[in-house]
Amino acid sequence: MNIDADKVITSLAVKLANSEVQAVKYETLAEQLQEKVSELQSRNAELEARVAELESTVATDNEGGELV
């Protein structure tokens, strides 16, 4: 091979390696984001349950048991 072909092959190999590194970074980021989404969905469910509990408490009058 001549020197220009070697340079092109080396350049393409470097670009491919860099692309693979970027792909791994994006996969890792996607996994981290999915974990965070799951955590937030769980927390949201907890908060919704707590809101329902508080709404139930507020909706009942302490003296007569009548709805407010």
Image (cartoon, helix red, strand yellow):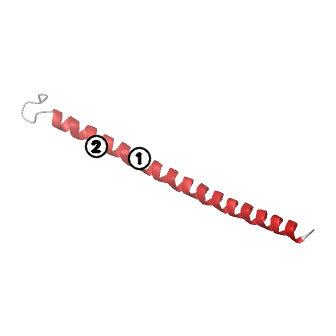
Is label 2 in a helix, a strand or a loop? helix
Q: Earlier in the sequence, mark 1 or mark 2?
A: 1
Residue at 74% x, 61% y is 16
- To which residue does mark 2 refer? 50
The amino acid on which the numbered mark 2 sits, given as a three-letter code, is: Arg
Residue at 87% x, 66% y is 5
Q: Which mark is residue 64?
A: none
Q: Quadrant of the C terminus?
A: top left
On screen, residue 60 above or below 4? above
Q: Closest to the observer: 45 or 26?
A: 26
Q: Which mark is residue 42?
A: 1
Q: Which residue is outermost to the right? A: 1
Q: Position of residue 12 (x, y in %)?
A: 77, 62
Q: Position of residue 25 (x, y in %)?
A: 60, 60
Cα distance in 3D space between marks 1 and 2: 13 Å
Residue 26 position by quadrant:
bottom right
